[in-house]
Image (cartoon, grey):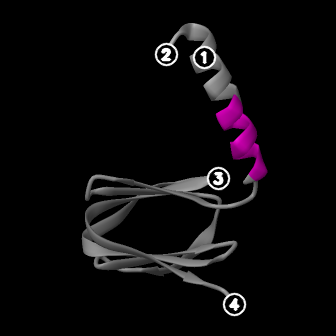
């Protein structure tokens, strides 16, 4: 991909990302890190389960030795041995 084409792709991606402004973004890295952007707080916090409130419901991360690595008003990072990530949507 040449420089011009990649710049066009990046600009298109930014435009699409703006459409989802206010929605939560969940990023899973391997089996040891989950990043949640756009959270509204933590509902449950234990070493085997962490539940995070988001605009559309609740995200539950299950695993072993889970811990809150970082939390800001914009995002949070959960680390540990992650086995499942589930979304319970509000109706």
- Say which mark, if any, is on residue 24: none
Label 1 sits on residue: 5
Instruction: Kindly indicate whether the residue at mark 2 contacts the one at mark 1 (C-beta within 8 angstroms).
Output: yes
Dot 4: element: loop
Residue 23 to residue 30: above or below = below
Tell us which disc is closer to us: 2 or 4.
2
Dot 4 crowding, Cα within 10 Å, few <14, some 14–19, many 20+: few
Residue 37 percent across, percent down from the top left: 59, 55
Residue 58 to residue 13: above or below = below
Q: Is residue 74 left or right of residue 44?
A: right
Whole-angstrom CA distance, mark 3 to mark 4, is 24 Å
Whole-angstrom CA distance, mark 2 to mark 4, is 43 Å
Which residue is located at x 61 percent, y 71 percent? 41
Q: Which of marks 3 and 4 is nearer the N terminus?
A: 3
- Say which mark, if any, is on residue 91: 4
Dot 2 crowding, Cα within 10 Å, few <14, some 14–19, many 20+: few
Q: Which of these two is toward me, 42 or 63?
A: 63
Tell us which disc is closer to us: 1 or 3.
1
Instruction: Kindly indicate whether the residue at mark 4 contacts the one at mark 3 (C-beta within 8 angstroms).
Output: no
């Amino acid at each position: 991909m040449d420089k011009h084409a990649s710049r066009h792709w990046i600009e298109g991606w930014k435009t699409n990302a703006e459409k989802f402004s206010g929605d939560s973004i969940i990023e899973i890295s391997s089996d040891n890190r989950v990043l949640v952007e756009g959270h509204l707080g933590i509902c449950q916090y234990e070493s085997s389960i962490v539940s995070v409130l988001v605009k559309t419901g609740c995200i539950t991360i299950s695993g072993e030795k889970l811990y809150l690595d970082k939390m800001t008003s914009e995002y949070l990072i959960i680390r540990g041995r992650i086995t499942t990530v589930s979304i319970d949507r509000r109706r």
